[in-house]
Amino acid sequence: QAFDSQPIVVAGKKEGSGKKFTWIGDDLYHKIASYADVICIEADGSKRLPAKFPGEEEPVVYPDADQICVVFGLSALGQKMKDACHRYLLADQIAEADEIIDESIAAQILQKGYLERMRAQYPDAETILVLNQADDDCLRERAVKLANLAGEDAKILSLKKEFEKIANFIEQK
């Protein structure tokens, strides 16, 4: 019914206090997938930190995925690994816990943790690097440097600014 009346449908199971959604399960996913034109799945949470180094079984991606977006929060730059990178201990060959994340470290986290692995596991899917939180000129410049070091044509954006545009548009209506 939701697909008949809404342009965007969000599906998830409430967890704990009800403030967090979790995976709906494979059965329900397959049941509703045929109703959707586009399905976006958040496959690898980072415990509200801007960066993450994934475990062996992460992220969980469906084999028929057309596109995989690897998202990195630029607010991790300038912070210690232990403060800004979820599962930083898994990246101990890249940087120590108290080491400051710069563009070079971030590029290695992204390449070794996600980009190389996703492209090897899902060769038919387009893998895109998304650098978020480019909220000012300085962070945008650092994002360009990070993308170059990673050897990627990254999408650089500020979701904060995009949400502000949407809010302003709604207020004007």
Image (spheres, helix red, strand yellow):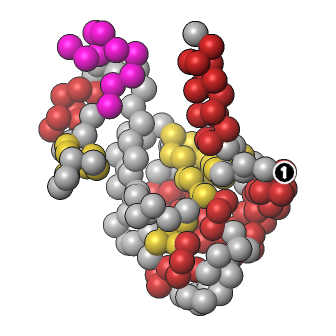
Q: Was residue 7 drawn as part of the magenta stretch in this picture?
A: yes
Position of residue 98 measured from the top left corner of the image (x, y, whole percent): 60, 89
| Front-most of residues 96 and 60 | 96
Q: Going by the picture, which residue comes out furthest to the left?
A: 27
Position of residue 136 measured from the top left corner of the image (x, y, whole percent): 78, 50
Position of residue 167 measured from the top left corner of the image (x, y, whole percent): 58, 26
Give the magenta part as a residue range: 1-10
What kind of residue is marked 1? Asp
Q: In screen coordinates, is 69 left or right of 107?
A: left
Residue occupied by mark 1: 137
Position of residue 66 measured from the top left corner of the image (x, y, whole percent): 48, 37
Magenta stretch: helix, strand or loop mostly: loop
Crowdedness of circle 1 by 10 Å Cα count: few (<14), some, many (20+)?
few
Q: In screen coordinates, is 79 left or right of 35?
A: right
Residue at screen point 17% across, 55% down:
16
Element marked by disc 1: helix
Residue at screen point 62% across, 13% down:
172
Residue at screen point 40% across, 16% down:
7
Q: In screen coordinates, is 43 left or right of 30?
A: right
| Front-most of residues 26 and 159 | 159
- Residue 16 visible to an observer of this rendering: yes
- Residue 91 visible to an observer of this rendering: no
Residue at screen point 71% across, 74% down:
78
Q: Was residue 4 drawn as part of the magenta stretch in this picture?
A: yes
Up-down relation of residue 94 to residue 127 (above or below): below
